[in-house]
């Protein structure tokens, strides 16, 4: 690779030559893997753009001859979940109603908690923190029934409030870990100087810690938005039939329809359900990776 | 804190204690309280309502005589072993390939990781469609000219659990890759230089130097995936709903069905206690290994 513009080339270590036998092997291996990963997305989109007659003639990989957006409209407006035929949009708005308060409450509670655990430790605080992290490994199934009893006693079983409380509880371990680790990594001099100046618990949090921790809040929001949107179990148990989130509605549409299966509508509904976390993922990039890696960081 | 005999002062640092109330309640009421409740009531004869009529191990005896439960356990074992080994091996290989100073690294990472942003329900439904015999992989291969090709992965009960493995790997390997890549990036460049100076081929360096050095990353990843494997539920509900017959049932689904649709609480609680035990068997040795020696490691490391 000789270049007449060598003076314009960047200095320092040069990337490996593009076409050495080793790199051809590396790139083709990665390419094969990438194709495997992209196939389901391709199949979803292609199927959702075909009419039913065309689906019956071809296979899942064949691209549409005649592109139609009708399945998308049907999926959104009039797909049937058992008795009702109001489309996946019902689930979409239910998921939004669950998502927004759950994300806000869980992050407020966990950020203040993480701050207390990093800067204002008290007797037993580390013990409770360790217990919280280990609690995250208990299978949800173990705690489900007692939680049903508790929420029923509180009168919030089968309501939006109920499922929001449950999301806040189970978001706590990972979010607290995230915030605690972040606040611990900030220079302690900041905190000490504010203490010397007479600032208290809430003032230091609101005026010093919060402005410095925007990135970690972004990570927390991404983590919670994808996690809560993708939840199925808590939604199906605690939200009540009226408030079923999008994942539950989607499963009802696809798996319990009577009569002829409309695969194109099913795939359109599936894409619509996956769209929110996918958009979050594509626009957040590095923050998403930080969020999922947070689970692997030891406290 | 220097004073070893500090007087009992519950009001000291009160704001922090108030801030920690949700955590304390979660730990005491949910994690400890609810778990103990479940374990205690698993020894009772509860049917549709919980009662404190203790019957010893009866529920467990009946549980392990139920073929649906033993099939569930067997499926979990197959799913667990295959998912763990394949996702660790493939995840590591992908990470090692990504670590070769390649171009388009961000594009590849985006592609490998996007399934992880999707829910298990979406994952399950897509793979159900791809594996449908009439239109999916079987039809594709037949259309290519292999007219007798059979791929009854969703219709033959002997194979359905492998469909769940395939879908699960698609969803989860990207995460393993990301964790492994972070681990690889933490390895000191000097190690690579030293290995190259000594003329050790790259694959040997990976196998005998890098992987042993990444032991903590492997163990942490292993624990995280194992914890999600034990909980596998929505993926099965969406992909096969346990069928055909009971061929792809899993423990988490057994618990849900017996508690919430069959009104057989005692069985559900006993089954969930077994799930808890499984997690503890994975978790306790890890916790002892990982957290005990850390206080001593302080002076030893670096």
Image (cartoon, helix red, strand yellow):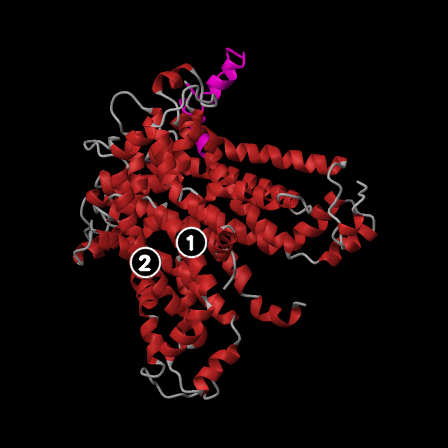
Q: Secondary structure at mark 1?
A: helix
> Which of label 2 and label 1 is nearer to you?
1
Question: What's the magenta region?
Answer: B135-164
Q: Is residue B142 magenta?
A: yes
Per the picture, the main secondary structure of the magenta-coloured stretch is: loop
**Above or below: residue B115 compared with residue A207:** above
Marked residue chain, label 1: A
Q: Secondary structure at mark 2?
A: helix
- Report the side of B189 relative to A101 (left or right): right
A299 and B82: which is toward the camera: A299
- Report the side of A78 relative to A20 (left or right): left
Q: Position of residue B126 (x, y in %)?
A: 41, 32
Residue B52: quarter of image: bottom left
The C terminus of chain B, quarter of image: bottom right
Residue B145: quarter of image: top right
| Alpha carbon separation for disc pair 2 and 1 | 13 Å
Residue B39 appearing in the image: no
Q: Earlier in the sequence, mark 2 or mark 1?
A: 2
Q: Do badges 2 and 1 share one subunit? A: yes
Residue A243 appearing in the image: yes
B232 and A107: which is toward the camera: A107
Q: Position of residue B57 (x, y in %)?
A: 30, 47
A99 and B192: which is toward the camera: A99
Crowding at dot 2, Cα within 10 Å, few <14 / some 14-19 / many 20+, comes out as many
Residue B109: quarter of image: top right
Q: How many marks?
A: 2
Q: Which residue is mark 1?
A: A223
- Report the side of A286 relative to B155 (left or right): right
Q: Is residue B167 magenta?
A: no
**Above or below: residue B1 compared with residue A39:** below
Q: Which residue is mark 2?
A: A168
Marked residue chain, label 2: A
């Amino acid at each position: 690779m000789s270049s007449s513009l060598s003076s314009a080339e960047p200095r320092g270590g040069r990337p490996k030559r593009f076409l050495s036998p080793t790199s051809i092997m590396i790139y083709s291996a990665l390419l094969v893997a990438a194709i495997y990963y992209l196939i389901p997305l391709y199949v979803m989109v292609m199927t959702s753009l075909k009419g039913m007659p065309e689906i019956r003639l071809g296979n899942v990989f064949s691209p549409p001859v005649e592109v139609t957006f009708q399945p998308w409209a049907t999926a959104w407006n009039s797909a049937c979940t058992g008795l009702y035929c109001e489309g996946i949009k019902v689930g979409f708005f239910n998921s939004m109603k669950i998502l927004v308060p759950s994300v806000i409450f869980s992050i407020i509670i966990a950020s203040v908690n993480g701050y207390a655990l990093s800067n204002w430790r008290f007797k037993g605080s580390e013990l409770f923190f360790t217990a919280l992290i280990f609690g995250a490994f208990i299978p949800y199934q173990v705690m489900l029934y007692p939680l049903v009893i508790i929420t029923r006693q509180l009168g919030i079983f089968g309501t939006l409030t109920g499922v929001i409380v449950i999301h806040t509880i189970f978001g706590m371990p990972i979010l607290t870990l995230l915030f605690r680790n972040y606040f611990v990594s900030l220079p302690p001099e900041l905190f000490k100087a504010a203490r010397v100046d007479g600032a208290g618990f809430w003032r230091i949090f609101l005026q010093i810690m919060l402005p410095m921790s925007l990135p970690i809040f972004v990570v927390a929001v991404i983590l919670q938005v994808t996690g809560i949107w993708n939840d199925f179990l808590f939604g199906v148990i605690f939200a009540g039939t009226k408030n079923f989130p999008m994942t539950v509605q989607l499963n009802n549409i696809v798996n319990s329809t009577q009569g002829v299966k409309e695969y194109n509508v099913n795939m359109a509904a599936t894409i619509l359900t996956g769209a929110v976390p996918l958009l979050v993922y594509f626009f957040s990039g590095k923050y998403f990776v930080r969020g999922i890696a947070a689970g692997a960081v030891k406290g | 804190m220097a004073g070893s005999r500090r007087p009992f002062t519950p009001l000291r640092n009160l704001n922090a204690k108030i801030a920690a109330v949700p955590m304390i309640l979660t730990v005491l009421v949910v994690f400890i309280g609810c778990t103990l409740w479940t374990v205690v009531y698993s020894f009772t004869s509860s049917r549709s309502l919980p009662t404190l009529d203790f019957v010893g191990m009866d529920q467990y005896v009946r549980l392990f005589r139920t073929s649906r439960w033993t099939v569930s356990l067997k499926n979990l074992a197959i799913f667990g072993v295959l998912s763990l080994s394949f996702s660790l091996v493939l995840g590591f290989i992908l990470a090692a390939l990504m670590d070769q100073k390649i171009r388009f690294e961000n594009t590849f990472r985006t592609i490998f990781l996007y399934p992880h942003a999707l829910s298990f329900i979406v994952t399950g439904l897509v793979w159900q469609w791809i594996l449908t015999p009439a239109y999916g992989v079987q039809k594709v291969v037949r259309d290519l000219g292999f007219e007798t090709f059979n791929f009854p992965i969703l219709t033959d009960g002997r194979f359905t659990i492998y469909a769940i493995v395939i879908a699960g790997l698609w969803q989860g390997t990207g995460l393993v890759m990301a964790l492994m890549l972070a681990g690889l990036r933490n390895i000191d460049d000097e190690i690579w230089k030293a290995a190259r100076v000594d003329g050790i081929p790259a694959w040997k360096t990976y196998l005998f130097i890098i992987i042993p050095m990444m032991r903590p990353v492997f163990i942490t990843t292993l624990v995280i995936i194992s914890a999600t494997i034990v909980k596998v539920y929505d993926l099965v509900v969406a992909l096969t709903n346990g069928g055909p017959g009971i061929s792809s049932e899993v423990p988490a689904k057994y618990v849900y069905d017996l508690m919430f649709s069959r009104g057989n609480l005692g069985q559900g609680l006993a089954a969930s206690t077994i799930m808890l035990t499984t997690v503890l068997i994975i978790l306790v040795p890890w916790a002892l290994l990982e957290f005990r020696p850390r206080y001593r490691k302080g002076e030893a490391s670096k």
